[in-house]
């Protein structure tokens, strides 16, 4: 399932392949994926950026926004299994099953089409009339982006919270972009227990948490993201980051650091893997 690094990787690829292109045709095959959960009239092709020239591609957390010159915006959330495919000019690629929307392009250096594919349909497309609207609605619900959050801001968002770190860091309203993989990996590298009450961290632990989080995310972006189940990037390549996971997906294995058997349990409704020796739970007051 795509998290921040996968979406950032996609955003960078789209910037280099479709920026400045004009959208000449939009084919929506499954209207239910547009503005899901909102009571709005059916989206038009114009809402989906028809005739717009792409001037900006931006990411916050796990969401991607495509903006055209007159200000219209399409916000994409990949959900559990979503992908954006970029089809090159000289390529002939059959439509995959579960391709819900396609955009034909004019003026892109190499690409002639992009496609939104989402087999499990937890993702979706949101149409917005302006960047202000994006910032005041969908992105207003998100905490600071995990790639650029600073320790002081994170400390403020965690302070006073009794819930565990795993649950707090998965909450997109606390910090945007992390999912199960990068939360488990970050907590392991920072030596913090997933159940440690979020409000009990000392300043040096918050600093360490942020350093490890940003370091892991940057490393994962460089490696093209993690390949978990169905993740392929927009050119169909698998990411390499999964080969570096130290806890995620390693339940039943030994800790790479101390050799003890890793623990696993469902925490915050998600399978969680950690080392109880390297990540001890500390009972203490702030
Ligand atoms: Zn260990």
Image (spheres, rainbow, N blue to C red):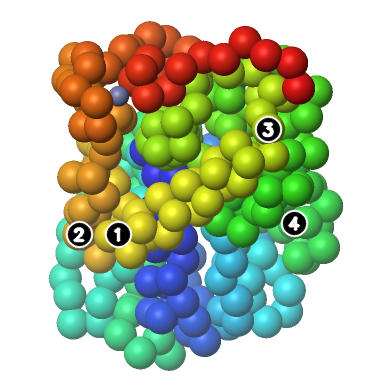
Left or right? Give the position of 15 relative to 57: left
Q: Can residue 232 be seen in this view?
A: no
Q: Is residue 147 above or below residue 13?
A: above
- Check whether the beta carbons of the residues at disc 2 and disc 4 lie within 8 A of each other: no
Q: Looking at the image, is mark 4 or mark 3 earlier in the sequence?
A: 4
Residue assigned mark 4: 134
Q: Looking at the image, is mark 2 or mark 1 earlier in the sequence?
A: 1
Q: Disc 1 or disc 3, which is closer to the eye?
A: 3
Label 3 SS: loop
- Check whether the beta carbons of the residues at disc 2 and disc 1 lie within 8 A of each other: yes
As rendered, which of 36 and 133 lies closer to the eye?
133
Dot 4: few (<14), some (14–19), or many (≥20) neighbours within 10 Å?
Answer: some
Q: Looking at the image, is mark 2 or mark 4 earlier in the sequence?
A: 4
Which disc is residue 224 wearing?
1
Q: Looking at the image, is mark 1 or mark 3 earlier in the sequence?
A: 3
Label 4 SS: helix
Q: Which quadrant holds residue 64? A: bottom right
Q: Is residue 203 above or below residue 233?
A: above
Q: Disc 3 or disc 2, which is closer to the eye?
A: 3
Q: Looking at the image, is mark 3 or mark 2 earlier in the sequence?
A: 3
Q: How far apart are marks 1 and 3 (CA)?
A: 33 Å
Label 2 SS: loop
Q: How far apart are marks 2 and 4 (CA)?
A: 30 Å
Dot 1: few (<14), some (14–19), or many (≥20) neighbours within 10 Å?
Answer: many
Residue assigned mark 3: 202
């Amino acid at each position: 399932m795509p998290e921040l690094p996968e979406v950032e990787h996609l955003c960078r690829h789209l910037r280099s392949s479709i920026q400045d292109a004009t959208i000449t045709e939009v084919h929506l095959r499954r209207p239910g994926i547009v503005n899901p959960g909102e009571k709005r009239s059916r989206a038009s092709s114009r809402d989906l950026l028809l005739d717009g020239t792409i001037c900006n591609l931006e990411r916050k957390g796990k969401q991607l926004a495509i903006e055209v010159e007159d200000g219209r915006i399409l916000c994409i959330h990949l959900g559990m299994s979503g992908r954006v495919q970029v089809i090159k000019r000289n390529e002939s690629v059959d439509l995959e099953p579960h391709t819900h929307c396609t955009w034909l392009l004019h003026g892109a250096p190499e690409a002639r089409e992009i496609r939104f594919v989402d087999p499990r349909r937890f993702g979706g497309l949101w149409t917005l009339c302006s960047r202000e609207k994006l910032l005041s609605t969908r992105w207003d619900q998100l905490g600071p982006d995990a790639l650029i959050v600073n320790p002081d801001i994170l400390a403020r968002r965690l302070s006073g919270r009794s819930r565990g770190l795993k649950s707090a860091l998965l909450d997109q309203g606390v910090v945007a972009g992390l999912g199960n993989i990068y939360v488990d990996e970050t907590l392991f590298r920072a030596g913090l227990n997933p159940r440690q009450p979020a409000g009990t961290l000392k300043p040096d632990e918050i600093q360490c948490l942020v350093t490890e989080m940003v370091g892991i995310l940057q490393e994962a972006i460089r490696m093209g993201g993690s390949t978990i189940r169905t993740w392929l990037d927009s050119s169909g390549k698998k990411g390499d980051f999964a080969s570096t996971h130290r806890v995620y997906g390693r339940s039943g294995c030994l800790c790479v650091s101390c050799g003890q058997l890793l623990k696993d349990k469902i925490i915050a409704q998600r399978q969680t893997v950690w080392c109880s020796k390297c990540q001890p739970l500390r009972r203490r007051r702030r």
